[in-house]
Amino acid sequence: MLTYPLEERGGLPLYEYLYRRIRADILAGTLAVGERLPSKRQLAEHLHVSVITVENAYAQLEAEGYVFAKPKRGFFVAPVVPLPAPPPSPPLPSIPVPKAAWRLDLKRTQVDASRFPVATWARLTRQVLSEDSGALLRPVPQQGLPALRQAIAEDLRDYKGMAVSPEQIVVGAGAEYLYLLLAQLLGREAVFAVEDPGYPKIRLVYEACGAVCRPVPLDTRGIDMDALAVAGANIVHISPSHHYPTGLVTPIGRRQELLQWADRTGGTIIEDDYDSEFRFSGRPIPTLQSIDSSGRVIYMNTFSQTISPSMRMGFMVLPPQLLARYRRDLGFYACTVPALEQHVLARFLSGGHYEQHLSRMRKEYRVRRDRVLDAFRSSPFADRISISEQGAGLHFLLRLETVRSDEALRRQAQTLGVRLGFLSEYAAVPSAAYAHTLVVNYAGLAAEQLPEAMALLAQIFAE
Ligand SMILES: Cc1ncc(COP(=O)(O)O)c(C=O)c1O
């Protein structure tokens, strides 16, 4: 009779322990092919367990094909090739906790999370759950929740002067996911011109999708039109409102040249409007999409900068022709943003909370940026730096006079717990022109941190 020490089953339910032990005996050949198992009642009595326990164990063995039943005769071992017992599974490794935060991190794109209206977000979440809980379990349309697309279209109309139908909007899990969709939509044979230097993920995602990317240099007004002409690209991906990481703002003249390029060549412009919301002076610059009369511009934006990168929410606006192609070729993709987040964001936008938050953050970041710039300008190394910033965005460039390489500066910074980002890291084609230039993301730098930050930088920059 089968005998197993049930007290060794640890946390396993009785039936599961029994099933595992019999399975192991079958795999080891201890129970031979064709051998009859004891009846459920006999085994239950023998092991002092209930018949149900044995019944469940046998049922599981039968479902997996280790035993088969013969009517009125009981269970028999099925023909299974005996296998050596698998090694005991090692304990699950735990995911390492990220290293202690940097003492000073000027590289990571951060937002000031402490200012986010968490209470409002929580209230809207409760509202959605109590008023429309059924909606959470209904499928979300592929392009995103209609209420969210409507709210985005209204926000674009009211704050960016863009006439966009909610039908044209596709919601996705952040800009980088939308790049992936665009690579598929525009075809693997498309040649993408990307800004150099520029946000590296744009190139990485397009190339990972098998598309060809041609880095095109910038001049003082944005992407260099002569270089674009020789790049042989049919798509150009740009951030004309506030280029990351140089901060360049493309003036209207260059925007018109870009639209003419698209008309002349039948090309497409992807307007990546990241970091456009934080303009500290003057009026917002009209988007390329809003002055495009030929349907050649795809507009995209993300809530990473305005709410938080952890939200993973972005959207794109497709011109009519590409929308038809999107629906035909990619309409099978499910929307990647969960329903609850979409419902809450829709209410956050349509209730005016989003623009209120932006307006508060604009004030906050303006003060913060001025303080940071003042701290740099009155630092011990002030006469060896030059700062370029255009009154916009959450980062600026800082050029340092030094004989040391970027790598040497980075290493020394690391030993002091400081993380620095360099313009050279954003370049596809290396150039001496980018050396000794830091990209300073200042949004996470609070006033009380500034004295320590300047002291640390003084140590790093000392020749
Ligand atoms: C031009 C540009 N677009 C988009 C992003 C990030 O977008 P997401 O977090 O939605 O992927 C960045 C981040 O630096 C960026 O520089």
Image: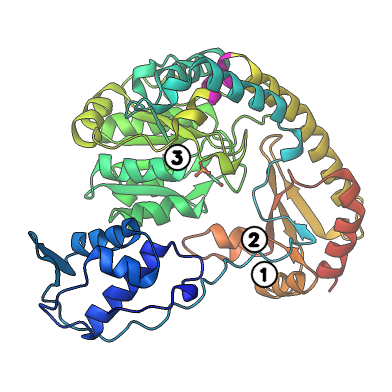
Residue to which mark 3 is pinned: 173
Does the beta carbon of the residue at mark 3 sit less than 8 Å from ligand 1? no
Depth order, front residue of 126/365: 126
Q: CA distance from mark 3 to mark 2?
A: 28 Å
Whichever of callouts 1 and 2 sits on the residue coming sooner in the sequence is 1
Q: Is residue 50 above or below residue 277?
A: below
Identity, as a three-letter code, of the amino acid under mark 3: Ala
Residue at which label 2 appears: 422
Quadrant (top left/top right/bottom left/bottom right) for the C terminus: bottom right
Magenta span: 344-350
Residue type, numbered disc 1: Asp
Query: Residue 295: which quarter of the image?
Result: top left
Residue neighbourhood size for the residue with mark 1, other residues' Cα within 10 Å, grouped as few (<14), some (14–19), many (≥20): many
Q: In the rendered image, which quarter contains the N terminus?
A: bottom left
Looking at the magenta stretch, what is its main secondary structure?
Answer: helix
Q: Which residue is mark 1?
A: 406
Residue 280 in view in this figure:
no
Q: Residue 363: which numbered mark, if any?
A: none
